[in-house]
Image: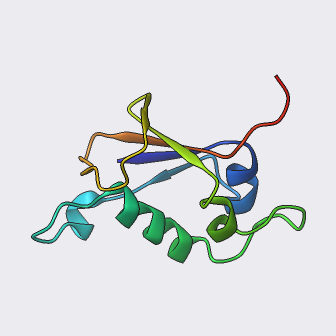
Amino acid sequence: MNVRFFAAAAAATGVEEQGVDLAALAGTEPFTLADLSELLVASFPVSASGHTPPLSELLTRCSYLLNEVAARDLSVALQPGDVVDVLPPFAGG
């Protein structure tokens, strides 16, 4: 699975993409978007940017796209080929 970070989320992590090996993480229960969120917070505990809050603070306001479709249900099970986009709130328009 591939996770893509945009805007402040990319600044906080210091990367624009991160691969996640679901086979290594999957147990008997499905690995969900909520599980991914917890994994990301543990993987990026501090911000890579002095001007951006840590990912743990940003994720509370972020939205997600799962394979280019808005995902609001954090209990959705993720699959190995999925692409998850982490989108912080954007200003302007």
Place residue 48 in its image quadrant: bottom right
Image spot of residue 31 (x, y percent): 25, 61
The residue at the point 55 percent across, 71 percent down is 41
Image spot of residue 92 (x, y percent): 85, 28
The residue at the point 71 percent across, 76 percent down is 46
The residue at the point 36 percent across, 66 percent down is 35
Image spot of residue 70 (x, y percent): 45, 33
Place residue 34 in its image quadrant: bottom left
| Image-based side of 80 in relation to 65, left or right | left
| Image-based side of 54 in relation to 82, left or right | right
Where is the C terminus found, in terms of image quarters? top right
The single residue placed furthest to the top in the displayed view is: 93
The single residue placed furthest to the right in the displayed view is: 51
The residue at the point 78 percent across, 66 percent down is 53
Image spot of residue 36 (x, y percent): 40, 61
Q: How many marks?
A: 0
| Image-based side of 20 in relation to 17, left or right | left
Q: Is residue 74 above or below residue 53?
A: above
Q: Is residue 45 above or below residue 9?
A: below
* Snapshot colouring: rainbow
Q: Is residue 83 above or below residue 57?
A: above
